Amino acid sequence: MQVCEVGEDGCLEWSAPDPCAADEVCEDGACVLGCTDACAPGASQCSGGGVSECVDDPQSGCTVWSDAAACGPGQVCLQGECVLPASACLGDCVFTKQAVPGGVDFYSVWGADAEDVWVVGDSGAALHYDGTSWLATDSGISTRLECVHGSAADDVYAIDTEGAIIRWDGIEWLPYVDLNPSWGWNACISVLGEENMLALVYDESGEKQVLWHVEDGLKTQLSVYAPQGVFTPSGSKPRSISLRAFSETQALMTASRALRWDGVSITDTGAPNRSFGLWAPTPNLAYAAAHTDGIGHRWDGATWKVVNPNLNGYMHMFTGTASDRVFGVGEILGGVAAITAFNGVGWVSVPTPADAKALFAAWAAPTGEVFAVGKAGTVLIGE
C-alpha cells in the first residue's frame, strides 16, 4: 500500500510501498483481509444432484465452487463425476453390517454420494464414511444429534435435541446457529442450498412446533404450530420429528401429526394415524411411518392413504430413489432389524444380518446403495 504525502520538495508524491500483512490484500487503498481458497484448482464435487467445478473467482482472486451443472439423462453424481448408476437392487439387496466406532444409537443418515456419507446419533456421535471405512469425528456436541443433511460434501449440517446447529465445512465441525428453544426436545433440518435451510424444533414449553429459516448464519422464525404434543412411536425408537423442505415456502413434516408449510402457516394434512419418519422426494409423493402395527402412509399431494408393507413389528422410516423403489426400515418384535421394499406393485421382505438391531433411519444414494442405521451402533449398507 502507498500513501499520497508531501515530499521534501513540498510536492505531493507516493510514499514507499508498505507491504500488507500475509493474510491481507490491498483493496481501494487499504489493507483488508484477503479471501481464502475454497478448493483446489481442477477439483470437482457433487452438489444438488449435479457437479460443481473448482474455478478462479476473477473478483477475489481465490478459488470458489461453481454452480452445479446437472448430470445427463439417467446419470447421477458420484465423487464429483457424472456416471451411469449400476443396476439398483430391491428385494435382492444384500445388507451387510458395518464395523463402526462406538456403540451408540444412531438417528439420521445422509450423504453427498455413496462414498461420502454421514451418520449421527447419541452423545454427539458423527461418523463419516468414505466408501471404504468409517471414521468418528469430533462434533463438539455432547447431546443427541437428531438429524443430518447437506447440499454438498463441504456443506453439511446436524442439529441436536436443544436446537444447536453445527456445520461441516469439509475440514471440521463448527458451531453454526443456536435456535434456543425454551425447553428443546426434538429437532430436524432440511437443507435447500449452501448455508440455506429450514429447521423444525419441538419446544416442550407450550408443546409447540417452531419452524425456522436459516441462511448465511442468520435465523428467522417462520411459523409456530401449537399446542401440539409429540408422542413416542411404538417400538424402541425415541420420540423424533422429520422435515423435508422443497423451498423456503413449501415443506412437509411429521411430528406425530403430518404437517405442511405453505409459506403462510403450518396445517395438519390429516394422516390416518400418528406419523413419524418421513421420506418425501417431491411435494406430491411422500411416505411416513405410522406409530404402530408396522404400517405407513403414502401422500399424493392431496391425501394420505394407509400402506401395509407387511412388517410384523414397527415401521420407523422410509427412503428410496423412485416411486417404484421404496424401502421401509424398522424392527420386528424383540428389537431385531427389519427392512421391506416396494417395487411399484407390492412389498417384499428384505433379509438383514441376524445381529442387526432396530433400524431408526435410512437414506438411499442416487447410485442405488441403501444406508440404514439404528440401535446400538447398527449401520447397514445394502447393494
Image: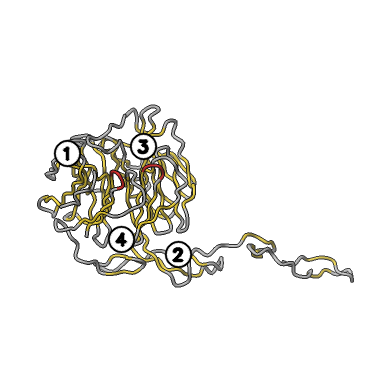
Disc 1 crowd, CA 10 A, few/some/many (<14, 14-19, 20+): few
Residue 209, image x, y percentages = 36, 34
Nearest to N terminus: mark 3 or mark 4: 4
Question: Relative to residue 314, is residue 242 drawn left or right?
Answer: right
Residue 182, image x, y percentages = 44, 31
Residue 65 marker: 2
Nearest to N terminus: mark 3 or mark 1: 3
Q: Name the mark nearer the viewer: 3 or 1.
A: 1
In this orientation, does residue 190 appear?
Answer: no
What residue lies at 30% left-to-right and 32% top-to-bottom?
230
Residue 377, image x, y percentages = 31, 47
Reading the image, the residue beneath label 1 is 333
**Which amino acid, mark 3?**
Asn
Judged from the image, the secondary structure of the residue bearing numbered disc 3 is strand
Q: Name the mark nearer the viewer: 1 or 2.
A: 1
What residue lies at 50% left-to-right and 70% top-to-bottom?
56
In this orientation, does residue 181 appear?
Answer: yes
Reading the image, the residue beneath label 4 is 114
Question: Relative to residue 102, is residue 327 drawn left or right?
Answer: left
The one nearer the camera, 310 or 9, is 310
Nearest to N terminus: mark 3 or mark 2: 2
Nearest to N terminus: mark 1 or mark 4: 4
The one nearer the camera, 118 or 122, is 122
Q: Name the mark nearer the viewer: 2 or 4.
A: 4
Nearest to N terminus: mark 2 or mark 4: 2
Residue 186 marker: 3
Residue 192, image x, y percentages = 38, 52
* Quarter the C terminus occupies: bottom left
Disc 3 to disc 2: CB gap under 8 Å: no
